[in-house]
Image (spheres, rainbow, N blue to C red):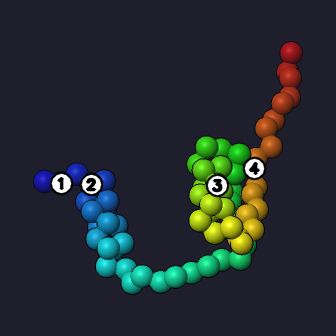
């Protein structure tokens, strides 16, 4: 018996393999959480592969209240 997570991963992998190859070029990209590690790597990757694309990002403001 295959665990549920592994089945889901295999299904998504099968869908990605059978997906038709399309070339899309977006002019603007909005990344939420750009200050995190995943968002920053994604921004760098997009800019390195598509230099004409404009990348915009949103980050969450940290709460710095002091309750002493």
- The reply to whether dot 1 and dot 3 touch (C-beta < 8 Å) is no
Q: Is residue 3 above or below residue 29?
A: above
**Visible in this render: residue 67?**
yes
Q: What kind of element bears circle 2?
A: helix
Of callouts 2 and 4, the N-terminal one: 2
Q: Where is residue 32 in the image (x, y as percent from the top left)?
A: 69, 57
Residue carrying label 1: 2
The quarter of the picture where residue 11 lies is bottom left
**Visible in this render: residue 39?**
no
Of callouts 2 and 3, the N-terminal one: 2
> Is 13 on the left or on the right of 40, as rendered?
left
Q: How crowded is mark 3: few (under 14 residues within 10 Å), some or many (20 or more)?
A: few
Q: What kind of element bears circle 4?
A: loop
Q: What kind of element bears circle 3?
A: helix
The quarter of the picture where residue 65 lies is top right
Residue carrying label 2: 6
**Label placed on residue 44:** 3
The quarter of the picture where residue 25 lies is bottom right
Residue at the image point whose x is 84% and y is 30% from the top: 64
Q: Distance between the residues labelled 2 and 4?
A: 32 Å
Residue at the image point whose x is 76% and y is 55% from the top: 58
- The reply to whether dot 2 and dot 1 touch (C-beta < 8 Å) is yes
Q: Is residue 26 above or below residue 36?
A: below
- The reply to whether dot 3 and dot 4 touch (C-beta < 8 Å) is no
Of callouts 1 and 4, the N-terminal one: 1
Q: Distance between the residues labelled 1 and 4?
A: 38 Å
Residue carrying label 4: 59
Q: How far apart are marks 2 and 1 (CA)?
A: 6 Å
Q: Where is residue 6 in the image (x, y as percent from the top left)?
A: 27, 54
Q: Where's the C terminus, which quadrant?
A: top right
């Amino acid at each position: 018996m295959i665990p549920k997570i592994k089945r889901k991963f295999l299904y998504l992998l099968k869908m990605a393999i059978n997906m038709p190859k399309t070339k899309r070029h977006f002019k603007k990209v909005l990344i939420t959480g750009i200050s995190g590690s995943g968002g920053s790597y994604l921004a760098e990757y997009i800019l390195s592969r598509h230099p004409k694309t404009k990348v915009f990002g949103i980050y969450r403001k940290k709460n710095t209240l002091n309750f002493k």
